[in-house]
Image (cartoon, rainbow, N blue to C red):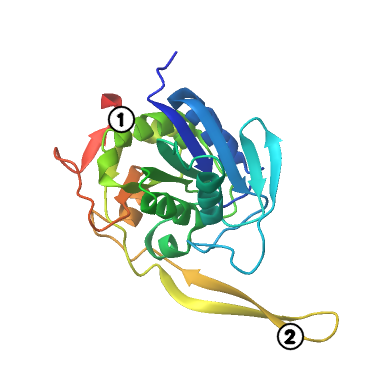
């Protein structure tokens, strides 16, 4: 039986309260904390970044013991929990995810998963975003985060004074992963903006907004895209003031 490292963890995500990645993170957090709270969006809020709801009220729906769905964004979830329950006793750690798909390079500023941990960091709470990469068209394999997620979180907790982290697990089987690497957020994966036009039942036009992406040209050894491509866990500091730990830019998972 593992030993809890903190008293209280707050979990959120941007894929919604019923997302499989959230259930995985709840199981991991249960081994890390004496008390786990979940406050997550009632439905998918991918792309929400750090946005908050200022034009509509927030509605909260109980989903079990210390488990709630909120009508707002991931950032709303962190702020709501802090104001509603934790004003005097904040959580020791906020975990966000596990996101369905990687959050690297130009995707990071738009990510609701990352937006939640940046919101927590502004409240003075250490926070970690976790995402599981996958190949388009293939069923997502969660084994990497299921097997290595707890060790990574415990290692980063030792560096909690540094702020917040963005952790991406590569799209491969867990047994293929040998190491985690400290890396930097790359640039240039969004090639261009894309609009898909349509027309509603009243013949009024609408558009779906998206991006054309590619990270194949990102080859720097310390870039997040490169680290994932080489089947290592990519760990990126999310604030400029953070410094990487001493002892090299990687650690073997067998050392955790």
User: Which residue sits at x=29%, y=25%?
Assistant: 254
The foreground one among 6 and 226 is 6
Q: Indicate the position of residue 29 as horizontal and vertical percent values.
A: 48, 30
Q: Indicate the position of residue 238 as horizontal and vertical percent values.
A: 32, 54
Quick check: 220 left or right of 78? left
The foreground one among 243 and 123 is 123
Tell which residue pokes out farthest to the front in this image: 88
- Note whether 5 is above or below 177 in the view shown: above
Residue that mark 1 sits on: 253
Residue that mark 2 sits on: 205
- Note whether 2 is above or below 156 in the view shown: above
Proximity of marks 2 and 1: CB atoms separated by less than 8 Å: no
- Residue 102 visible within the image: no
- Residue 218 visible within the image: yes
Disc 2/disc 1 C-alpha distance (Å): 52 Å
Residue 39: give its label. Answer: none
Please report whichever mark, 2 or 1, sits nearer to the chain's N-terminal start.
2
The C terminus sits in image quarter:
top left
The foreground one among 218 and 51 is 51
Q: Indicate the position of residue 161 as horizontal and vertical percent values.
A: 26, 41
Q: Secondary structure at mark 2?
A: strand
Q: Indicate the position of residue 81 as horizontal and vertical percent values.
A: 54, 45
User: Which residue sits at x=70%, y=39%?
Assistant: 62
Quick check: 239 left or right of 59? left
């Amino acid at each position: 039986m593992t030993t809890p490292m903190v008293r209280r963890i707050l979990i959120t995500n941007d894929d919604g309260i019923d997302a499989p990645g959230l259930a995985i993170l709840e199981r991991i957090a249960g081994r890390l904390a004496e008390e786990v709270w979940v406050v997550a969006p009632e439905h998918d809020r991918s792309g929400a970044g750090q946005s908050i709801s200022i034009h509509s009220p927030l509605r909260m729906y109980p989903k079990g013991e210390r488990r709630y769905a909120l009508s707002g964004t991931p950032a709303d979830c962190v702020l709501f929990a802090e104001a509603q329950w934790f004003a005097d006793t904040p959580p020791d750690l906020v975990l966000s995810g596990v996101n369905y798909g990687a959050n690297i390079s130009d995707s990071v500023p738009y990510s609701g998963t990352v937006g939640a941990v940046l919101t927590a960091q502004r409240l003075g709470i250490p926070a970690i975003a976790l995402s599981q990469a996958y190949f388009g068209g293939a069923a997502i394999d969660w084994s990497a985060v299921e097997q290595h997620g707890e060790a990574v979180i415990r290692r980063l907790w030792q560096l909690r004074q540094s702020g917040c982290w963005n952790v991406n697990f590569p799209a491969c089987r867990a047994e293929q992963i040998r190491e985690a690497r400290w890396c930097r957020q790359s640039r240039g994966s969004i090639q261009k903006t894309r609009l898909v036009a349509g027309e509603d039942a009243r013949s009024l036009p609408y558009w779906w907004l998206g991006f054309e992406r590619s990270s194949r040209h990102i080859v720097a050894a310390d870039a997040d895209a490169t680290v994932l491509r080489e089947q290592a866990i990519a760990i990126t500091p999310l604030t400029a003031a953070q410094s990487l730990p001493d002892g090299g830019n990687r650690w073997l998972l067998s050392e955790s």
